[in-house]
Amino acid sequence: MILTPCLPFKNATRTINLKAECLQPLGSFKIRAAANAIESTDKKLLHDGIITASAGNFGQGIAQAGKNRGLPVHVFVPNTAPQVKLESLINLGATIEKISFEDWWEIMITRSTGRKGCFIHPVSELSVILGNGGIGLEILSQIPNVDTIIVPVGGGGMISGIALAIKALKKKNVRIVAYEIESSTPIFSAKKAGKPIKVERGASWIDGIGSTGVLEEMWPLLDQLVDDVVVVSHSDAETALRELALKSHLVSEGAGAVALAAALNVKFTGSKVVSVISGGNIDMTTYSRIISGINV
Amino acid sequence: MILTPCLPFKNATRTINLKAECLQPLGSFKIRAAANAIESTDKKLLHDGIITASAGNFGQGIAQAGKNRGLPVHVFVPNTAPQVKLESLINLGATIEKISFEDWWEIMITRSTGRKGCFIHPVSELSVILGNGGIGLEILSQIPNVDTIIVPVGGGGMISGIALAIKALKKKNVRIVAYEIESSTPIFSAKKAGKPIKVERGASWIDGIGSTGVLEEMWPLLDQLVDDVVVVSHSDAETALRELALKSHLVSEGAGAVALAAALNVKFTGSKVVSVISGGNIDMTTYSRIISGINV
């Protein structure tokens, strides 16, 4: 795990700061939470190995941390996960099981897999949420006058951890903003309805964010901690992916491109913005098509 | 200018460290030297503006530093420089003049452009060389037990600055290694001949390193300071460019890919290696073709 840099990104009118979690070992912020989760689990419970359900990044973190301890790791993955993430899991010694997105989401809700072993939830485990808090602490030390932190929402674990760290330090002027992609807006919809509701999950080249609804057990946290939600279009996300390559020289996954696009929203003009580039694990074929400007 | 991270890069057998200068504002280490050069120049001499000869990155640094002071900047560029670098220069308010690589190299040797203004040499100016020394100091603070530092050679300004910083701190066990691409090996050839000799400059998608010979005025420094030279093939450089995207999530220019390829040379097995990823300014069409695995 490294202290990731907070890189300035300039355009014609202003400078925002990008917390480059894509530079973490294994290419995403998830290594922070995974290491923390295994360290905080009673050793006896780990006897039959570890099970998780993860689109890839959290699974990789758990696979790495499990490997370090000589523990077998089994990961349920939705069949929408990109090949590059699955290969990383296998290279780290984990076994993987592909299931439909619906069945995978069912595990996220029920924690039930029918398999022996210690299940570590990728989002709502307290140790996972707290493991993400370090990102918030680092941002405050790097950009002390930050007033807006923009964070992706997949399950909500990262944004909750960051927000809890900010609240713990009583930084009341810092707004916590979630971003989503237009094809799936569970938190935007829940905020509007005042409770989690089922939403469509449209096709997208962007994985890792977007689901069919906010997890019930995460709603109390998200309801209190998230101050605003920005929804980004695919077109803006594609432009942002290219900008991250051209100007910041970062290879970002889709969710990270949405981070930049959200931060450039005019509503944040005049704010001191930090946006979290959550990871960099993206299929190279998709990536090269988008950055070369060919429509996908 | 930022303190760039030194990122671990793991393969099956070992871990090397990548000094990610591609994350600097403007995408390369050259901002360090350019800012230092303008700061150290007598203000009276800058009255008629600044002239330099640069394939792009140093020019960008000078253009930015000149713009900050309200000084006009004129940059002579070889017609082999990629469009993306020229556009950056223009966006920073510089005027550019395209000339043949031979004419451009002539300016590098003679410092004579026939144009009024203060000429700042991109390589052999003492203030430029010393401006690069900061990279060496940062590496020593980040990886205190480093024993091999691998650095690109274009004109030799960066490697000289880094080596001088290391020598100043009396770190006698640190070896300074230059890397070059197979299509142009001025320093490898000069080391072999014991003096600068004219070499071929073959076609390559990699710009920024490689010339037709070591500058005479740089030879005494390079002769003394460079302990070894590694020559990298285009095939290894292309593989390294993909690895930097896939595993480190860095967009690197060709010279940076050569840095990784050089560091993976078996001769450095067992060494604590830091390799300098000099910059990230690369044409997106070339880049996307290489990372998608299509031959260019």
Image (cartoon, coloured by chain):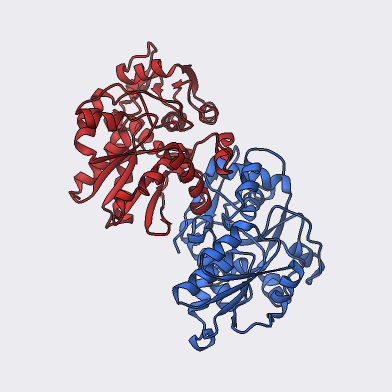
Chain colours: A blue, B red
In the rendered image, residue A247, in percent from the top left (x then y), is placed at: 54, 41
In the rendered image, residue B292, in percent from the top left (x then y), is placed at: 59, 43
Q: What residue is at 77 percent from the left and 67 percent from the top?
A: A190
- Above or below, comparing residue A212 to residue B140 in the picture: below
In the rendered image, residue B131, in percent from the top left (x then y), is placed at: 32, 38
**Count of marks, rendered view:** 0
In the image, B167 versus A151, the foreground residue is: B167
Image side of residue A249 versus residue B45, left or right: right
| In the image, farthest residue toward the bottom | A44
| In the image, farthest residue toward the top | B114
- Above or below, comparing residue A262 to residue B104 in the picture: below
From this viewpoint, is residue A174 visible? no
Q: State the quadrant of the N terminus of chain B.
A: top left
- Above or below, comparing residue B171 to residue B161 in the picture: below
Image side of residue A213 versus residue A65, left or right: right
In the image, A221 versus B279, the foreground residue is: B279
Q: State the quadrant of the C terminus of chain B.
A: top right
